[in-house]
């Protein structure tokens, strides 16, 4: 490292300018960049510029040949239309997007990291302090949805100056002039990086995601995209084969490397893999300078004198260390928040919201739920000081039906008398529209009362009131609505099979065809389940009774004594396809549920044609929640293979927030 550091780094400002620079950051704290502004830190080489009519292949080739990590994309009017980054190439590569696709289509397609709609949050003035840029990168990284390593530099009149990335900040941290003319190694005690070592700042081994050398290029791309770590280490018990980053993906995409290519073979033909290794006890300032001189974004940290990997150091890690405090610390924690928000899911299906009139009866509510396909309805109820909204669900209708309540009984009376004065949902089931799908699924599991299940959350409006009700079936709708391969992957729905999350047959209550409908529905109450298999005298499953049957029965005024066999015969033509195989993908099962508004599917063995289990929308929610570990939306089996059993510990989120 010391030999390489003799190259030094070019000064970016005069001594006088350095002396006059402010020493405080944007919030009054110590400025690790010593007042350096954005324009002074712009790369000496010209920014990579492309047009909307250029292609993804042009982008990959431009980034590969210039060494930059982002290109500014301009429209026909000459104004900046967006940033196209190496992460865009990475995702396009994974999604198998054609190299001939135009950048304009990509930026508008919803998969871009920095489309025009997000430019405002990714743009800084030339006069802005670099400390402010560091804050911007950290905040964008925390969000998880945008290009956290880049900002566009534009003046107030719209003139484009260039693009600053995290490595430019690292170079500014090590600028000799900013250190009063001293070399970084000679002034460590006065430098922001001080006597820190690589080990103090790197991502430790338990937060490094790995792939074995027998994996394909697409397997590795999948790992980089889902973990949002921008690097994946290729290693096995024999040692390190290399590290794959978005820059490597850019080169492979530009060279036309197949996604099925063997990663070990590709790495053997890729020069420079050995210069990415650094001892973990090396000074951070030396490692950062090494990255700056060789234009590297990632280093693999090893135990001194060995090839045993103990962590990974990135440019962003160095930038984070320069911005002390809780923001940087939060970013070091695993990011668990990707995926759609509950408010977005409800907005996609506004026609499914059900609101009943005041003083509605049980029969009227049942009819409304039957017509809408929903499992819950909002109901205005009288309160002492102000009107409230009550929530009535299909389980309420079920208990009212089996409890002998008449069809014309007021729902409000049921809510107050039968449910122990429960006019409105408890506070812990009121959630903000910004809550992520994975957290909503987790809350459904943790918020259930003893001996009860929780299938519904009330989503609060931004200005007060209710936006709607989010049900377990909305989890299926959200999975069904995922539009790209990466989105499906993040929901674990690409590989997880129904058999891994269904309730096995032994855990599902059963009823006989000769049982009365009231008796069958009462079993659901007794077993705290929302579905029961109908099993004939030979032990063969021949149907399913669910809480939905209670809604239909109350709506139609069906006799309590009607047999299950007669009931199933009357509904045979009404039910959608309810059977799936144990090997059916979760995404396919979610699609069936969403298309036909079904909360339950019977899992049937193709060989015996008999039921082996039942999959409910709440099981689907349980599957989504259980995979909330160190990596968002990744199957337990896959995560366990990558990081071991400790990575699969589940922590439930709280419902707090506004």
Image: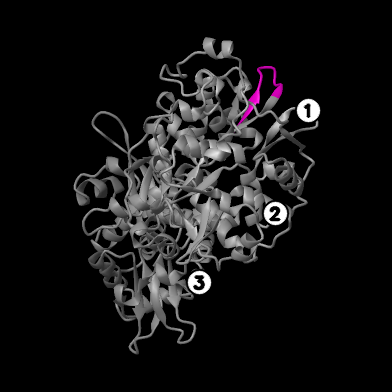
Q: At x 46% / y 71%, what residue is drawn?
A: 571
Q: At x 31% / y 55%, what residue is drawn?
A: 445
Location of residue 337 by image quarter: top left
SS assignment at label 3: loop
The CA span between labels 3 and 2 is 32 Å
User: Of tags 3 and 2, which is closer to the observer?
Assistant: 2
Which residue is the site of mark 1? 78
Q: How crowded is mark 2: few (under 14 residues within 10 Å), some or many (20 or more)?
A: many
* Pick the front one: 348 or 58: 58
SS assignment at label 2: helix
Find the magenta span and give its range.
147-160
Q: At x 66% / y 38%, what residue is drawn?
A: 70
Q: Where is residue 649 in the image (x, y as percent from the top left)?
A: 32, 57
Q: Is residue 446 magenta?
A: no
Which residue is the site of mark 3? 584
Q: Where is residue 44 in the image (x, y as percent from the top left)?
A: 69, 28
Q: Earlier in the sequence, mark 3 or mark 2?
A: 2
Q: How crowded is mark 1: few (under 14 residues within 10 Å), some or many (20 or more)?
A: few
Left or right of 633 on screen, residue 622 = left
Q: Can residue 370 be seen in this view?
A: no
* Pick the front one: 116 or 589: 116
Q: Do callouts 3 and 2 mark residues in contact (Cβ within 8 Å)?
A: no
* Pick the front one: 128 or 376: 128
263 lies above or below 385: below
Residue 253 numbered mark, or none: 2
Q: Is residue 420 visible?
A: yes
Q: Residues within 10 Å of mark 3 (few under 14, many from 20)?
A: some
Q: Position of residue 613 (x, y in %)?
A: 38, 75
Residue 402 numbered mark, or none: none
Q: At x 33% / y 59%, what residue is drawn?
A: 646
């Amino acid at each position: 490292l010391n030999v390489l550091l003799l190259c030094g780094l070019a000064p970016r400002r005069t001594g006088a300018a350095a002396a006059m620079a402010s020493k405080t950051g944007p919030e009054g704290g110590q400025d690790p960049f010593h007042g350096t502004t954005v324009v002074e830190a712009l790369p000496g080489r010209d920014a990579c510029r492309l047009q909307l009519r250029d292609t993804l292949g042009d982008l990959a080739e431009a980034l590969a040949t210039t060494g930059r990590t982002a290109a500014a994309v301009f429209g026909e009017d000459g104004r900046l239309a967006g940033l196209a980054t190496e992460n865009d190439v990475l995702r396009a590569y994974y999604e198998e997007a054609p190299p001939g696709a135009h950048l304009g289509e990509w930026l508008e397609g919803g998969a871009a990291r920095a489309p025009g709609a997000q430019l405002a949050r990714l743009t800084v003035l030339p006069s802005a302090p670099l400390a402010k840029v560091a804050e911007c990168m950290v905040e964008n990284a925390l969000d998880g949805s945008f290009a956290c390593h880049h900002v566009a530099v534009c003046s107030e009149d719209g003139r484009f100056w260039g693009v600053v990335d995290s490595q430019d900040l690292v170079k500014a941290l090590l600028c000799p002039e900013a250190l009063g003319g001293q070399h970084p190694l000679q002034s460590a005690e006065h430098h922001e990086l001080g006597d820190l070592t690589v080990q103090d700042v790197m991502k430790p081994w338990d937060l490094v995601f790995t792939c074995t050398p027998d994996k394909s290029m697409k397997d590795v791309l999948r790992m980089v995209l889902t973990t949002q770590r921008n690097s994946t280490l290729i290693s096995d018990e024999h040692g390190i084969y290399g590290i794959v980053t978005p820059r490597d993906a850019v080169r492979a995409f530009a060279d036309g490397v197949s996604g099925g290519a063997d990663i070990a073979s590709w790495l053997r033909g890729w020069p420079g893999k050995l210069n990415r290794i650094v001892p973990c006890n090396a000074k951070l300032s030396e490692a950062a300078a090494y990255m700056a001189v060789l234009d590297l974004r990632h280093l693999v940290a090893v135990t001194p004198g060995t090839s045993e990997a103990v962590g990974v150091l990135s440019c962003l890690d160095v930038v984070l260390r320069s911005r002390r405090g809780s923001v940087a610390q939060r970013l070091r924690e695993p990011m668990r928040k990707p995926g759609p928000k509950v408010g977005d899911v409800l907005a996609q299906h506004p026609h499914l919201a059900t609101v009943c009139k005041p003083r509605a009866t049980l029969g009227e509510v049942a009819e409304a739920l039957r017509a809408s396909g929903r499992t819950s309805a909002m109901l205005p109820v009288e309160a002492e000081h102000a009107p409230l909204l009550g929530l009535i669900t299909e389980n309420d209708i079920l208990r009212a039906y089996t409890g002998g309540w008449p069809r014309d009984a007021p729902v409000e009376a049921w809510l107050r008398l039968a449910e122990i004065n429960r006019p409105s949902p408890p506070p812990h089931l009121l959630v903000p529209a910004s809550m992520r799908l994975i957290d909503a699924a987790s809350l459904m599991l943790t918020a259930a009362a003893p001996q009860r299940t929780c299938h519904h959350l009330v989503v609060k409006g931004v200005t007060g009131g209710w936006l709607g009700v989010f049900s377990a079936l909305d989890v299926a709708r959200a999975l069904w609505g995922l539009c790209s391969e990466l989105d499906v992957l993040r929901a674990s729905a690409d590989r997880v099979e129904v058999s891994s999350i269904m309730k096995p047959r032994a855990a599902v209550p059963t009823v006989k065809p000769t049982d009365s409908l009231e008796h069958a529905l009462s079993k659901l109450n007794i077993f705290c389940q929302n579905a029961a298999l109908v099993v004939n005298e030979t032990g063969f499953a021949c149907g399913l009774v669910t809480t939905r049957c209670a809604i239909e029965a109350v709506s139609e005024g069906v006799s309590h004594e009607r047999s299950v066999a007669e009931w199933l015969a009357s509904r045979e033509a009404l039910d959608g396809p309810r059977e799936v195989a144990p090997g059916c993908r979760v995404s396919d099962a979610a699609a069936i549920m969403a298309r036909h508004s079904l909360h339950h599917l019977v899992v049937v063995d193709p060989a015996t044609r008999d039921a082996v289990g039942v999959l409910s929308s709440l099981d689907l929610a349980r599957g989504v929640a259980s995979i909330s570990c160190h990596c968002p939306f990744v199957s337990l089996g896959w995560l366990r293979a990558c990081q071991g059993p400790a990575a699969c510990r589940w922590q439930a989120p709280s419902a707090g927030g506004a």
